[in-house]
């Protein structure tokens, strides 16, 4: 089982999908479950047929988790949620969510008998729904998993094998797609931009946050604020975010048509996919000021930041602008490593889970701990999770001035657990606070200096404006 702790939020078509990783983080302190085998006995095994209004009912065999002879992803998922999810969740809620998802399946009139796993008595609701709908075993199982996750927080999700493959591909740094950063927004929430959702609907929309420089999306004219409503002529209403991501991606040189809404108009944008290198770190030298933009906290991004800092310091910089605008987050281990480049001791962040608290200490050997080097961190509403941990830690330690807009306000930590069906669960397992115990969930981090920056501002223009806001004297 792969265990990776991460702080992530947004999705990148053709780049990263929720910043998940395919290898264990070295400092993971929540142990992996010893097994994902069946768990507790809750009811005797029976076979029964439920009445149906959609044709002949399908025979459903009830199997308790302790009696299952083979892999049982539903039992595994129930066990993981019960053991690791940040808040207690009643089995009745999980079962109700799962049953609702099964009921929403298209009836396929399969003649095969179905097996319904019962991790708790309440899951009898799911068995009944399976019999009534008559969908295939695979579809029923996947719907059950999606439905269970739907009652958790929006940052927890079921990843099917294809979605998981895409996430693992992201970590290689070489992927194929269009290169656009998107975020889901829950229109029923008080602050939709700060409230993600999982399934596209009339109250859950998918919005383009930004496109990467020179990407196919940028060249085709996709812009920030575009709302996605269709892919290749198909309405995406009812699709999960992972399904949209998997469909938008594809081999380099192939075509994808996105239907978007912009300023009250519906537009068709044709994009030719390409091979992309994830631009995790970008740097520039502007006079005596170094500029370092960090787009994502991926596996190895701390090493990339270390190398970039080393180069800028060798150039003799007196100030550094660390640009975290629209950075959705990523791996916690990389975040600690990057913060440690600027701090000479103490705690970077604390995570609080139901049964334990973990403290992540500064690692020795940072390159930019000398406080004669002025540091400014630039953030905006799209700076989330790991970006908030980093900027919050540097602000609280007095190591950097934070300039920009209030950040997103995501204070949770996710962990990935692989399932026997080739998919995985991404579960919220903890909440994070700063070294001093400050929780930035909801309102986000308030900058020392409030400012807005155009998305297309050049590094030189940004450095000039930041220097003025921070009161730096700079050499041209």
Image (cartoon, grey):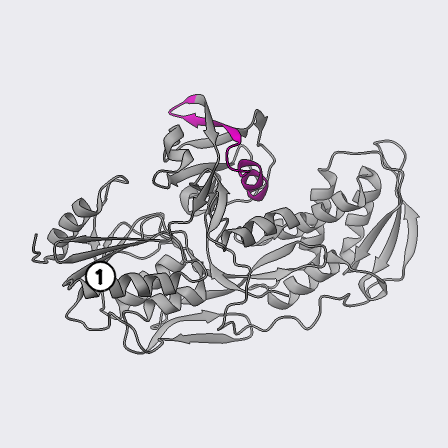
> How packed is label 1: few (under 14 Cα within 10 Å), some, or many (20 or more)?
many
Please give left or right for residue 466 compared with residue 306 in the image: left
Mark 1, residue position = 312
As helix, strand or loop, the secondary structure at mark 1 comes to: helix
Residue range corresponding to the magenta coloring: 241-265
- Choose between 42 and 271: the one closer to the eye: 271
Percent across and percent down for residue 71 are 78, 60
Residue 206 in sight from this viewpoint: yes
Question: Residue drawn at (33%, 67%), measured in percent from left and top?
Answer: 339
Percent across and percent down for residue 369 are 24, 73
Question: Residue drawn at (46%, 61%), measured in percent from left and top?
Answer: 299
Residue 439 in sight from this viewpoint: no
Q: Does the segment drawn in magenta span residue 248?
A: yes
Q: Does the segment drawn in magenta span residue 332?
A: no
**Quadrant in the picture for residue 309:** bottom left
**Quadrant in the picture for residue 225:** top left
Percent across and percent down for residue 214 are 35, 38
Tell me the quadrant of the picture where the N terminus can be found: bottom right
- Choose between 353 and 398: the one closer to the eye: 398
Please give left or right for residue 21 compared with residue 130 in the image: left
**Quadrant in the picture for residue 386:** bottom left
């Amino acid at each position: 089982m792969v265990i990776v702790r991460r702080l992530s939020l947004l999705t990148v078509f053709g780049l990263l999908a929720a910043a998940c990783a395919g290898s264990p983080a070295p400092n993971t302190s929540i142990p992996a479950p010893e097994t994902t085998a069946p768990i507790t006995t809750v009811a005797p095994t029976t076979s029964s047929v439920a009445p149906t209004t959609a044709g002949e009912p399908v025979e459903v065999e009830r199997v308790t988790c302790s009696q299952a002879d083979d892999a049982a992803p539903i039992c595994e998922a129930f066990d993981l949620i019960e053991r690791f999810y940040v808040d207690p969740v009643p089995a009745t809620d999980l079962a109700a969510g799962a049953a609702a998802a099964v009921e929403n399946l298209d009836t396929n009139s399969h003649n095969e008998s179905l097996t319904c796993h019962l991790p708790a008595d309440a899951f009898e609701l799911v068995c009944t729904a399976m019999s009534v709908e008559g969908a295939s075993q695979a579809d029923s199982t996947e719907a059950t998993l999606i439905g269970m996750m739907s009652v958790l927080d929006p940052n927890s999700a079921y990843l099917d094998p294809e979605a998981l493959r895409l996430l693992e591909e992201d970590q290689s740094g070489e992927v194929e797609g269009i290169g656009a950063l998107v975020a889901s927004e829950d229109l029923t929430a008080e602050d939709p931009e700060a409230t993600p959702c999982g399934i596209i609907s009339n109250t859950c929309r998918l919005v383009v946050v930004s496109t990467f420089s020179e990407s196919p999306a940028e060249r085709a004219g996709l812009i920030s604020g575009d709302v996605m409503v269709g892919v290749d002529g198909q309405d995406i209403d009812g699709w999960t975010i992972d399904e949209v991501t998997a469909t938008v991606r594809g081999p380099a040189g192939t075509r994808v048509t996105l239907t978007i809404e912009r300023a009250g108009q519906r537009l068709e944008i044709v994009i030719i996919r390409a091979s992309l290198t994830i631009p995790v770190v970008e740097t520039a030298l502007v006079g005596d000021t170094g500029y370092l933009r960090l787009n994502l906290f991926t596996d190895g991004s701390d090493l990339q930041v270390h190398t970039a800092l080393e180069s800028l310091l060798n150039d003799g910089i007196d100030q550094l602008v660390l640009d975290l605008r629209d950075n959705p987050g990523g791996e916690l281990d990389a975040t600690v490593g990057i913060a440690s480049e600027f701090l000479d001791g103490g705690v970077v962040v604390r995570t609080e889970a139901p049964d334990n608290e973990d403290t992540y200490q500064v690692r020795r050997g940072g390159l930019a701990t000398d406080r004669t080097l002025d540091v400014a961190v630039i953030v905006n509403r799209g700076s989330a999770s790991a970006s908030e941990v980093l900027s919050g830690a540097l602000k609280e330690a007095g190591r950097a001035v934070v300039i920009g807009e209030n950040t997103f306000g995501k204070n949770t930590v996710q962990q990935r657990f692989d399932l026997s069906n080739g998919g995985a669960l991404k579960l919220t397992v903890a909440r994070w606070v700063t070294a001093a115990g400050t929780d930035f969930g909801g309102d986000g981090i308030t900058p020392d200096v409030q400012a807005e920056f155009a998305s297309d501002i050049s590094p030189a223009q940004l450095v000039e404006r930041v220097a003025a806001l921070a009161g730096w004297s700079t050499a041209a």
